[in-house]
Structure formats: structure tokens, C-alpha cells
Image (cartoon, grey):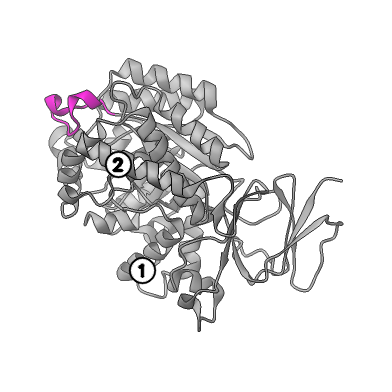
Amino acid sequence: MTARTWVTNPLAIFTANNDDAAGGLVVEGGEIVELVAAGQTPREPWTTVFDASDHVVLPGLVNTHHHFYQTLTRAWAPVVNVPLFPWLINLYPVWARLTPRYLELATKAALAELLLSGCTTAADHHYLFPAGMEDSIDVQVQVVRELGMRAMLTRGSMTLGEDDGGLPPQRTVQAPEVILADSERLIGRYHERGPGAQIQIALAPCSPFSVTPEIMKDSAALAVQHDVRLHTHLAETIDEEDFCLERFGLRPLDYLESVDWLAPRTWLGHGIHFSDAEVTQLGAAGVGVAHCPSSNMRLASGICRAIELEDAGVNVGLGVDGSASNDGSNMILEAKQALYLQRLRYGAELARPERALGWATRGSARALGRSDIGEIAVGKQADLAFFKLDELRFSGSHDPLSALLLCGADRADRVMVGGQWRVVDGQIEGLDLQELITDHSKAARELVAG
């Protein structure tokens, strides 16, 4: 008999779609095959039971924007107190010293931290390919598979170096033909389609101030040809807006449209500085936005108009962003930050815990173009995060779902990906976390020291 697991009687459950699953759910073959109402039992026989009466159950959290390699430069003193442009100018020379081994450790650290926070799918924006780093995405694929997570790995690019008026050092930029050839190679080798895909590839020129319009247009055409998604940073800072006006004579969104990116296959990192008309335009185009609250606060970039964007039809998701501008890779804490930051802009009535959790799950999945994850519903992947509320911080709390964010949950007790347990009792299956910390910390010191 095929294993059928009844996750029974959760303390609370957030389905992201208002389905009734108060009595739990049934997992079979990596999918959710039944939802159980309160006081009921599954319609079909089950083989095993997992008692979730001590757990708040969520769909696996989905991270829509990250830079895994940046876990090696957390809290680096020279950039602690600067905004985005000087932050980048100081860090680019350090990042240019990346090696495959450093990237492997950085990716593993980022994914492990995400997994422990209840995240099951992560999008990474990797755009650094200095000499010796040509196989960066291949390195990341192997780490994703080792940890048993899902990932949208983006083949980023930079073509506009300092010599041509961009921000990146020349040794970090690549020729367009190299970028496009490698993009096709990666799509052909790794991109999976359909429900349950583990690895997907997207194309991701870095930002208006680090790539030329030509690579933006060529990447858009290649994405259409191979039916993959597009990602870039946009409207993150006023400095970026000024750069676009000076160099292209266009606001960032108008520039995006001029290079054929204003389409449903596109999702944007940050998306802060949009006008009222641009919010409407984004919704009509079906573009997604990765809201990155911690990074936006850390770099003093501004507050994303997430609620207005969502109301306009934009697929709003959450991203932890790079671990050198967030300094962490924790998705459940990112949902809390999103809740609080949006309350500053829109008030407590509109920014509710359920809305923030929706961004971290269903909204993020949709931003990545996925309909098989991000919800607890029949036919969806059995990607689930289980949180206990037995620590002192939760003592005296009454509503379990609200308590996750308001009381500051920061670590999942259990995490399931495709019906397989990847975190059990707060520990990642098969990973020596202390060894990883030791090796990763050593690599971080070496990278900064040069």
C-alpha cells in the first residue's frame, strides 16, 4: 500500500486559501490528497499518523529574492551604515574574490537557515561570475539537491562596468554572448517544468545600473523562446531612479517597458519607488514584486507599496534579499517584518498577520509562476512548515497564527518538502550544522581578508 500520512488535529492551520483543514490533511506520494474538517477522519484509509496538536501548520514558505553568496559578508563593518550605492561599491571588490568552494558554503548556509525557518522554496539572484566562477549555478544546483529543497536559480548577469558608467568593477562583468550561451546551457540542463519541479532556471540581468539595455532585450527574447521567467532589481532606491533618468531619459518602469520586460513572466526585486499610475500599470501587466522589508529598512531604501500593489493585481511575495543587507535568511521573521513595515504605511487594519503570511506563501509562489506550492489544498505539493509555541516568548498568547508573527517565531520544529521530512525536531536531516558553521565562518574571514 502506498504510504498515506494523516497530519492530524493541528493546533492551528493556515491554508492560504480559506479551505477548511482544521482536522488536518492527508499526504500521499508527495502531494496533499485530502483536507480533513474539524472532528472528521479521512475518507480513505491512512497508513501513518503525525499528531500536529502541538503545531501551527503553514504551507512551506517561499522566498522570492535572495543572494546566497552574501552570507559570507554579513555585518561587515565598512558597510554597516551606508545606503545601497556605496554599500555595493565597497562590497563588489570583496565579492569578486568568490571561489566555487566559498559559493558552495555560502549557498548551503543560506539554504539551511531558510529551511530551519520553514522555507521550502527559494529564489536566488546570482549575478557574479568572475574568472573561475563560470559554473556558479551548477554549484548551487548540487547544494539544493543535497538539502532536498526547491529553488528558482537565476542566471544573473552584469555587463555595464565602471569603465562604461556602471557600478561593478570590470572584472565582474561578462560579454553578452557568454551570458546568453550559459543561460541556454543552464535552461537545457536543469530547468524542470510542471508540478513538483525541484530546480527551475530564470534569467536575471542584475539592475539598470549594472547591465546594458541590449542584454535586457536579449534576455527577454531568450526567456520567451524557452518559456522561463525573468527577474531583476527595480525601483529599489531614488539613486537608481536618478541613474535611469540621466542615462536613459526614463523612469525605471518606463525603462523596463522599453526593453520588453513588462510581462507576466517578470518579477522584480524590491519595487519600492512606483507612482500611483505605475502601480496600476504593474498590476495590468501581471508583473510580480518581491517585497524585501528587512533589506529595505537596513539600507534605508524606502517602504514598498505592497498592499496597493496587491490590490492592483500584482503578485506580491516576500524575499529576505541578500544576507549582507538583511544579515539573515529567515523567512518567518521576514513575514513579521513585512507585517510591521506595512502597518507603518497603511495602518493595523489593512496589514494583518494573515496577509503577511499570504505574501510568504501563496503570493510568493505566484510571483515565481508556480501554482503547485504555497497553499494547503488538494493537489498541491506536500510542502509544509510546523511551528511549536512552547517557548517563553509565546506564553500567554491566545491566537496561534497571530502569535507566530507577533511573538516572533524564528525556527520551525519540522519541515516537509514533497512529503519528505527535511527538518525533524529543529534539526536538518543529514546535515552537520556545527561543521557547516565552522567551515562557513572560516571562508567568510578569508574572503574579506583577501
Q: What's the residue at 82%, 66% (across, down)?
A: 41
Check contact, mark 2 vs mark 1: CB within 8 A. Answer: no
| Displayed quadrant of residue 153 | top left
| Distance (Cα) linking label 2 and label 1 | 31 Å
Horizontal and vertical percent for residue 214?
28, 23
In the visual, does 413 lie left or right of 356?
Answer: right
**Residue 161 placement (x, y as % from top left):** 18, 27
Picture layout, residue 427 above or below residue 397: above
Q: Secondary structure at mark 1?
A: helix
Residue 286 showing in the rendered view:
no
Location of residue 318 in the rendering, given as x and y in whole percent from the top left corner: 42, 53
The residue that disc 1 covers is 340
Q: Is residue 96 rendered to the left or right of residue 229?
A: left
Q: Give the residue displayed 78% in from the left and 74% down from the top.
A: 39
Mark 2: few, some, or many residues within 10 Å (few <14, many ≥20)? some
- Residue 213 vertical placement versus 5 (above, below): above
Q: Which residues are magenta?
A: 158-172
The residue most toward the bottom is 396
Amino acid type, label 2? Ala
